[in-house]
Amino acid sequence: MGQKTNPIGLRLAVNKDWASKWYAEKKEFASFLAEDRDIRDLLKKKLAGGAVTKIMIERAAQRVRIKIFTARPGVVIGRRGAEIDNIKEQLSRMTGKDIYVDIQEIRKPEINAQLVAENVAMQLERRIAYRRALKRAVQMAMDFGAEGIRIRCAGRLGGSEIARVEQYLEGRVPLHTLRATIDYGFTEAITKAGLIGIKCWVCTGEDKPSKNQDDDVIETGGVARSDNRKN
């Protein structure tokens, strides 16, 4: 199952969070969902060169708070905040609500799966050899502290007549281990031969239970057994 589902969706209740945080009644749910999609599409288009990986949206009454995760906060904010003010104005006109924007910087873009996939896609669009691009992305991720990385390209690689799949794996990427911190990214490279899909999985560690937690569980179990004997 871990190989056939989105690693982020599979871990939502464990160590991942929702991209949209709000509650709506049945009548408003569809309109809010469409509005979230329009907001993300506009931001992705406006901030195409800002290395934006994730956009989180929170709602409260007539206020919408948007958190933008980016590796280039200076590009997103613009000179003296001009770019971000322009974005706020456009979103406010589009939604009719008060817009608040927070910028959060990504410290290590080399181990962010979405940025790794987009970097490989950009190189493929510039006609750089796909093997070179994939090997370089894998090496960079391992050098910056990733426990493992898996990257997969599918399509007419190198302009070949028949589409095929190429993938590289370095380290460990345990998709079935829910406590493992797996980052997942997907994008498409637009080339003359057609679309090339790029998927990337990056493992940065595991949330292993501490020794104190194990001791608490053992002590709790002992108390429960003694109570049952008394009864």
Image: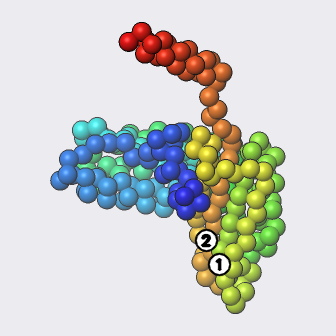
Helix, strand or loop for disc 1 = strand
Residue 59 occupies which quadrant of the picture? top left
**Tag 1 and tag 2, C-beta contact below 8 Å:** yes
**Left or right relative to 61: residue 157:** right
Front-most of residues 58 and 184: 184
Q: Position of residue 35 (x, y in %)?
A: 32, 56
Query: Residue drawn 68% across and 66% down?
Result: 152
Callout 1, which amino acid?
Gly
The residue that disc 2 covers is 197
Q: Position of residue 133 (x, y in %)?
A: 77, 65
Q: Is residue 93 above or below residue 165?
A: above
Q: Is residue 123 above or below residue 155?
A: above
The residue that disc 1 covers is 155
Q: Position of residue 76 (x, y in %)?
A: 54, 48
**Left or right relative to 21: residue 103:** right
Callout 2, which amino acid?
Gly
Q: Look at the image and tell me in which quarter the N terminus lies.
A: bottom right
Residue 127 occupies which quadrant of the picture? bottom right
Specify few, some or many for label 2: CA neighbours under 10 Å numbering under 14, 14-19, or 20 or more.
Answer: some
Helix, strand or loop for disc 2 = strand
Front-most of residues 220 and 180: 220
Instruction: Spot the residue most to the bottom.
Output: 161
**Left or right relative to 140: residue 198:** left
Distance of label 1 from label 2 (alpha carbons)? 7 Å
